Image (cartoon, grey):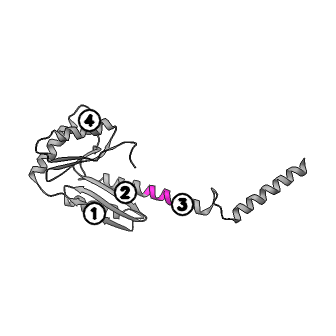
């Protein structure tokens, strides 16, 4: 019995040595550890970029800030109503440790009293609906209203498909809106 166990143990060691020599990755290989460490670092960087953007003082429900992280480069995109918000976003992201470069593709929306009027009307129409009022109590509501030359785009996150459709319906009811594009994502269904 002991001899059989010893033979079994030795054959197990030989199989393990052959697997290690052939380069087959194991859970504790340095390559997998590096990959996990890079993924953790990327997740941390994404959280920090998101935090910095949300904390910008002039960021509102009428702005949309998005970003991509590619290694140590951050690509900013979206639309803002104030030119200073574009430069503030870039400065905030550049100050994050580990960010080597920032590409700022944020669009500054044109100044328009008519668009400002539409923004207020859309805010009232969407956030006064009983089914959507709970979104209005957040520090920065998750449904963003982007207005450019009378065209409306809804960006952000809704809790359900019903909320997404209701927000689009309310936006379509506002007078003087040329078109409504509903880009809301249902929570849990985002990429």
How far apart are labels 4 and 2 at the CA level?
Answer: 28 Å
Q: Does residue 173 appear in this view? A: yes
Q: Nearer the viewer, residue 69 or 23?
A: 23
Residue 49: mark in rendering: 2
Residue 91 sits above or below residue 63 on the image:
below
Secondary structure under tag 4 reads loop
Most extreme residue toward the top is 130
- Where's residue 102, x and y in %? 34, 66
Most extreme residue toward the left is 113
How far apart are labels 3 and 2 at the CA level?
Answer: 21 Å
Q: Foreground mark, 1 or 2?
A: 1
How far apart are labels 4 and 3 at the CA level?
Answer: 41 Å
Disc with the residue nearer the chain's start (3 vs 2): 3
Residue 72 appears in which quarter of the rendering?
A: bottom left
- The residue carrying mark 3 is 35
Residue 45 sits above or below residue 171 on the image:
below
Q: Is residue 22 left or right of residue 43?
A: right
- The residue carrying mark 1 is 105
């Amino acid at each position: 019995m002991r001899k059989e166990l010893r033979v079994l143990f030795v054959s197990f060691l030989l199989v393990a040595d052959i697997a290690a020599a052939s380069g087959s990755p194991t859970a504790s290989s340095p390559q997998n550890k590096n990959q996990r460490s890079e993924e953790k670092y990327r997740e941390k960087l994404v959280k920090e970029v998101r935090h910095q953007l949300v904390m910008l003082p002039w960021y509102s429900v009428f702005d949309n800030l998005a970003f991509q992280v590619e290694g140590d480069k951050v690509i900013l995109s979206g639309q803002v109503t104030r030119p200073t918000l574009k430069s503030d976003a870039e400065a905030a992201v550049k100050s994050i440790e580990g960010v080597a470069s920032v590409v700022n593709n944020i669009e500054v929306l044109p100044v328009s009293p008519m668009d400002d009027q539409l923004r207020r009307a859309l805010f009232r129409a969407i956030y006064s609906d009983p089914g959507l009022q709970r979104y209005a109590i957040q520090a920065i509501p998750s449904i963003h209203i982007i207005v450019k030359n009378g065209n409306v785009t809804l960006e952000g996150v809704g809790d359900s498909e019903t909320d997404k459709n209701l927000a689009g319906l309310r936006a379509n009811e506002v007078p003087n809106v040329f078109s409504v594009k509903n880009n809301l994502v249902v929570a849990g269904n985002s990429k």
